[in-house]
Each structure stands twice: as structure tokens, then as C-alpha cells.
Amino acid sequence: MNSTRTLSFEFFPTRSEEGRAKLAVTRRQLRQFSPQFFSCTFGAGGSTRSGTLQTVTDIMQEGMPAAPHLACIGARRHELLEILDGYKALGIKHLVALRGDIPSGVGLSTADGLHYANELVEFIRKEYGDWFHIEVAAYPEFHPQSRSAEDDLRHFVRKCEAGADSAITQYFYNADAYFHFVDEVQARGVDIPIVPGIMPIAGFSKLARFSDMCGAEIPRWLRLKLQSYADDSASVKALGLDVVTELCDTLLAGGAPGLHFYTLNQAGLCSTVCQRLGLG
């Protein structure tokens, strides 16, 4: 991969020592591709806060840059400061700043809270200056809670104007959606790197449920083809590898600034795609 392009892998916190050990093996397998960083998700309302801290601490101790996700929904400012101070003390300089999903029972009326990702970005910049490289989320096929495509674009621009350094997209399987989104935000004066998020295809049913929930479109031809394989997991994975590898190749050839893989804590499919792309 061109040295100006970034490669990164995302994990979620595990809930057991066995899971933590397995995740360490996964990271070791993916380090062969010399990624710029590993990121780790942060549960709704900070529900995996301790797991996120443990995971990013493990990543840093392995000598890799870590980028913890930080969601502002359900957190007060002093809680966010406590988390951020802890990350700074660990030497972490990279964050993924998100609004986060609204957990049940948590409203948006907290007087001391932050309600949107642009407010979180602005808060981090005010308190820490340029210490952190701040990533934000982008939605080429638009956030499922957006009132309109234009409204979604305005939200993204606000995050960039608040001080975001770069963005990582929700996953997608239509390269044109990504290129169109980049053109749209550049037309609005935003020129930060927007890195495509890549989801390998391990199976159909879970992918379909998750995609329907988060607003990521599975093209009709791909959905029907995957459905036709039913329980033939080998054929699903083979098709998925071909589709995702071609998608990544198209994105990089079209000028995408890198790739960010949603690993689901598994190395196999991501490794195969990276090898096919000649990244290893």
C-alpha cells in the first residue's frame, strides 16, 4: 500500500480472559500488514468502558498505536474528562469520537452532557488542543436516523468544522456511494481524509440483520446471491472474499486514503483480503 495511505483494524472489547487472549492472537496475526493503528469500540452509555481501556492498554503494551472509541451519549463532562485524561496518561494520541447509540433508559436532557458528535469534538479540542488526532464517523449511505441526505451531510460538515482530523465510514458494498459522498462533502468545503470502512462477509443472516439496523445497503444482486447459498458457508465466504477484495481494489484505485477493517475480532477474512491486495 502506498505509504500515504492508512490501514487500520477495529476490535470490540472481550468479556473474559479467554477472549482477551484470543484477541491478542488476532492482533498478532494482523500486525504482519503494518497497520497504522488498532481501534476499539465503546459500548452504549460507556457499557464497555473498562473493556475498552483494557483492550487499548494491551494494544499499547504490544507496541502498537491504539485508537479508542469515545461516545458522549449518557456521559457527563467530568466522566469524559476522566476517560480522556487516562488515555493521555497512557500516551494515546488517537481517538474515534462518536455520539453513540442511545441506550434504553437514557435521555438526551442531561444538562451537563453532550448530545452530538460535533459537540464532543469541540469539547476535546477545547480541553486538549491538538494532543489527540480525532476521527469521526461518516455515512456514505446516510445515517439511519437522519431526516434527509442533506441533513446528514450538514451533520458531517459540523463535525469537521468542530475540529475532526479525519473520518472512517460505515461499511458499504457500493463503491459509488463512497465516491459520491466524498464529492458531496468536498463541494461543501470539507477536505479531511475519509477512510472507507470495510466489513468482510463471513455469513449472510447476521450481516443482513446488522445491515438493516445500521442502514448499510447490501446490493440486491449480492443479497440474492448470498441467500441462494443458504447454509453453504464455504460458498458464502468465497463470494464474500471476491466481492470485498474487488471493492477495496476499486476504492484504492479511485483515490481512497486507506482502508479500515471491521474485524469482528477475527483475523482470517481480513488477512486474506489484505494478502490479495498485496498489503502483506
Image (tube, rainbow, N blue to C red):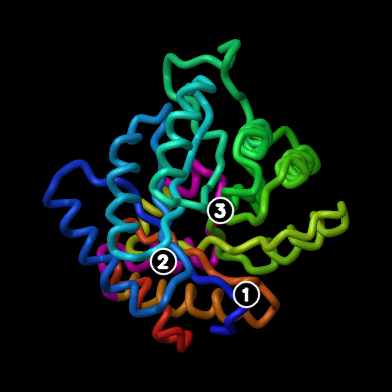
Residue under pointer 1: 251
Say which residue label 2 marks: 200
- Under mark 1, the amino acid is Leu
Give the SS element for disc 3: strand
Image vertical order of residue 76 relative to residue 226, above or below: above
Residue toward you, 212 or 254:
254
Q: How far is the residue under mark 3 from the one under mark 2?
A: 13 Å
Q: Position of residue 189 (x, y in %)?
A: 86, 54
Q: Residue at x 65, y 72 (%)?
A: 256
Q: Main secondary structure of the magenta part?
A: helix
Is 226 part of what is drawn in magenta?
yes
Local packing at callout 2 (Cα closer than 10 Å; few below 14, some 14-19, many 20+) is: many
Q: Residue at x 54, y 67 (%)?
A: 221
Indicate which disc residue 74 carries.
none
**Residue 212 location, x and y as percent?**
50, 45
The residue drawn where x is 58% and y is 81% is 3
Residue at the spot x=43%, y=27% of the render?
Answer: 45
- Position of residue 167 relative to residue 255, above or below, is above
